[in-house]
Amino acid sequence: MKEQYAVCHLQRGSGNDSGMSCHIERKDANGKTYVPDNADSSRTHLNRELVSFPDGVRNRTEAIQYRIDHAGLSRKVAGNQCKAIRIILTGTHEQMMKILDEGRLDNWTEANLRWLNETFGKENVVSCVLHMDEKTPHLHATIVPIVTFERQRREREGEKKYNTKSGPRLSADDVLKRARLHEYQNTYAAAMSEFGLKRGIVGSTARHIATSTHYKQQMRQYEENIAKLQEEVEKAKEGKSTILALFGKGDLAKARKELASKDEELARLQAKIAKLEAEKATLKQRHESEIAKLRNGYQKEIDAAIKRAEIAERKAAVIERQKNRIDELDCKANPQRYRLSSGAELIGHRFLGNNHYTVTLKIWTRVKEIEYTDVTYLSDSDKRLHAFSNGELTDHEFVNACFSAAEQVNEIQANLLSAAIELATGGSAQPQVGTGGGGSTSELPWRDKEKNLKKRTAIKRH
C-alpha cells in the first residue's frame, strides 16, 4: 500500500504578506472575487476561514498588523522585517479524499488548529483558511512570529556581554530555526497520526519545485514525447515505402492490407502529436496568464508602495520643517545651549574607533581663521553620551560637558578669546598649550591650576 504522508510547509511572507492574501482569501483588496486558474469556481463557496478576526479587522492583512500593534513590542518593527509566516497543512491526496469521504474533515481541521495554537501560540495564529476548491483539501495558516524567549547569542572570547531585553519581540529567524523546523515536522506528524498520515522521510532529498521550474520540466517532457512520436512517424513512413515495393512482386492483396495498417498507425501517431501540441500550447498560455496576473499584482503592490513612500516623504518634509523651526526658536530663546563655553566656533565633532568599552570623541573648533582639534575618551555607559543620544543635549552642550573651556581652544585661539574665556571661567584663563595640531594638553588643566592657586593662597595666610 502506498504510504500516506502529512504535509507541513512553512514559508516566510514578504513584509505583511499582503500579496498572498488575494490568493488565500479568494478576493482582492477591494473585496472583488478572485479565483485562480487551478481552482474550481463552483466549489469556492466551500472554502472557510477558521479563525475569527478581532472587531474592526476585515481581512488577513489587517489581522497581521493588528497582532503586531497589540503584542506589546518594545522595539520598532523595521519596514523590511518579516511580519508573517505562511504554513500549508495537508496530506497525501488519496488519504485526504478518504478523510473527506468518511466525514472526518472537520475533525482534521480541529486537530490542525490545536497543533497551530499549541506550537505557535493561539494569539499568533491570525488566520487559517480551508481550501476546498482545489484538487486536494488543504489549509493556509498564517502566524505572526512573535516570541517571548530571550535571543540566543554566541559568546565570543573578549567580547563584552550585553544584557538581553526581555519581553515579546518579532523574530521570524527564531521561529524558523533548523532545529525547530525539524521539531514541527515531528509534532505535526504525531497530531495527524489518528488520520492515517505519517511523517515524511527524515533526511529525504525530495524538495519543493518552484512553479517556473515545474513549467519548464513539463514543456521539456512534451517536447521529448513529441520528438519520439515524430521518430515513430518517420519509421512508419519508411515501412510504408517498403510495402509499396511489394507491388512489383505481384502480391497486391498483402500490400494493400499492410498499407491500410500503416495508414492507421500514421493517423494514430499524428493524432497523438496534435493532442500533445495542443496541451503544450494550453500549458504555455496558462503559464503566461498566471505570470501576467502575478506581474499585475506585483505592479499594484509596487504602485501602492510608491504612493505610501510619497506620502511618507511629504510628511517627513513637513516634520523636518517643523523640527527646524523648533530648533530655530529654541536657539533664540536659549542661546546658551548653542555656543561653546570658550567662545570658539564649533566646526563639528565625530565619534572615532570601534571599541566596545570606550567611545573616542574628536572636536574641531575655529577662532577667526585659526582651527584646532582635540580628543577625549568616554565610557560607553557615560550619562552625557546617553543624554546626547536621546536628544536631551545640543551639540554645543555635549561638547561643553565633555571638554572644559581650556580644552576647546589652543593658545593662539585663547589669546584671541581671553575676554570671553575669563567671562566663561570666572577668572584669568591659562589655555592648554598647543599649536592646533590637536590632542596636546597643558601640564595642568585649569581646574588643577585653580586648586594649586587656592593652596598657595592658604599657605601665605598662615
Image: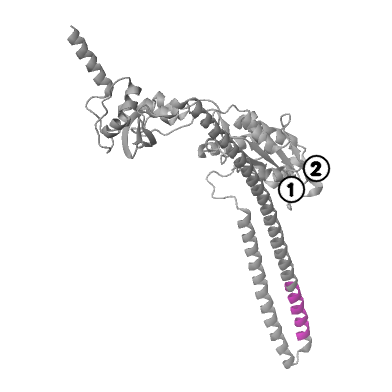
Q: Which residues are magenta?
A: 254-269
Compared to 106, does 234 lie above or below?
A: below
10 Å crowding of disc 1: few (<14), some (14-19), many (20+)? some
10 Å crowding of disc 2: few (<14), some (14-19), many (20+)? few
- Residue 25 is one of the magenta-drawn residues: no
Q: Which residue is mark 1?
A: 134
The mark nearer the N terminus, 1 or 2, is 2
Q: Position of residue 296 (x, y in %)?
A: 69, 53
Residue 190 in sight: yes
Q: What sort of colour scheme is used for the picture?
A: one colour
Residue 100 found in image quarter: top right
Q: Which residue is mark 2?
A: 45
Q: Position of residue 328 (x, y in %)?
A: 52, 32
Q: CA distance from mark 1 to mark 2?
A: 12 Å
Principal secondary structure, stretch drawn in magenta: helix
Q: Secondary structure at mark 1?
A: loop
* Residue 59 relative to residue 360: left or right: right
Residue type at mark 1?
Glu
Residue at (28, 36) in percent of width and height: 438
* Residue 125 relative to residue 106: left or right: left
Nearer the observer, 187 or 314: 314
- Residue 257 is one of the magenta-drawn residues: yes
- The disc label shown at residue 7, or none: none
Residue type at mark 2?
His
